[in-house]
Image: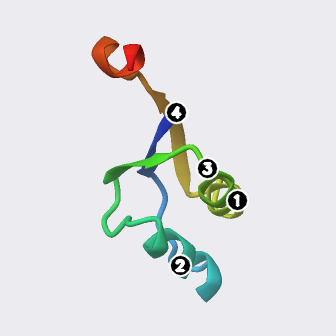
C-alpha cells in the first residue's frame, strides 16, 4: 500500500477543538513536524478535514519493498 507524508504547516490556534483533535490524532504535535501514514481512506478523511493546516506528499517506496 502507498504511503503519504503529512507535515503540520499551520497552527490550530483559533480553529475549533475537533480540528485540533484531528491534528493530534494524526500524530502531529509541533509545527513543521512530519509523520508517515498508510494511504487509507481513514487517514485521507482526516487529512481532508484539516487540509488547510497540513501539507501532504507521497513517499517513494524503496525498490526492494516494491518487488515483494
Disc on res. 40: 3
Q: Residues within 10 Å of mark 1 (few under 14, many from 20)?
A: few
Residue corresponding to mark 1: 45
Q: Residues within 10 Å of mark 2 (few under 14, many from 20)?
A: some
**Mark 2 vs mark 3, CA separation in Å:** 21 Å
Q: Which quadrant is the C terminus positioned in?
A: top left
Circle 2 or circle 1, nearest the eye: 1
Horizontal side of 30 relative to 1 (left or right) equals: left
Query: Circle 1 — which element?
Result: helix
**4 or 1: tag closer to the N-terminus:** 4
Circle 2 or circle 4, nearest the eye: 4
Query: Circle 4 — which element?
Result: loop
Disc on res. 2: 4
Residue corresponding to mark 2: 20
**1 or 3: tag closer to the N-terminus:** 3
Taking the view exactly as shown, the residue that stands out farthest to the bottom is 17
Residue 41 in the image: state x and y as whole percent: 69, 53
User: Who's the residue at 57% across and 43% down the image?
Assistant: 39
Residue 15 in the image: state x and y as whole percent: 62, 78
Disc on res. 36: none
**Mark 2 vs mark 4, CA separation in Å:** 26 Å
In terms of depth relative to the viewer, which is nearer, 40 or 7? Answer: 40
Q: Is residue 16 visible?
A: no
Amino acid at each position: 500500500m502507498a504511503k503519504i507524508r503529512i507535515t503540520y504547516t499551520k497552527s490550530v490556534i483559533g480553529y475549533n477543538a475537533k480540528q485540533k483533535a484531528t491534528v493530534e490524532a494524526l500524530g502531529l504535535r509541533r509545527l513543521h513536524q512530519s509523520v508517515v501514514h498508510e494511504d487509507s481512506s481513514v487517514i485521507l478523511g482526516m487529512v481532508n478535514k484539516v487540509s488547510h493546516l497540513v501539507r501532504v506528499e507521497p513517499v517513494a517506496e524503496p525498490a526492494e519493498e516494491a518487488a515483494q
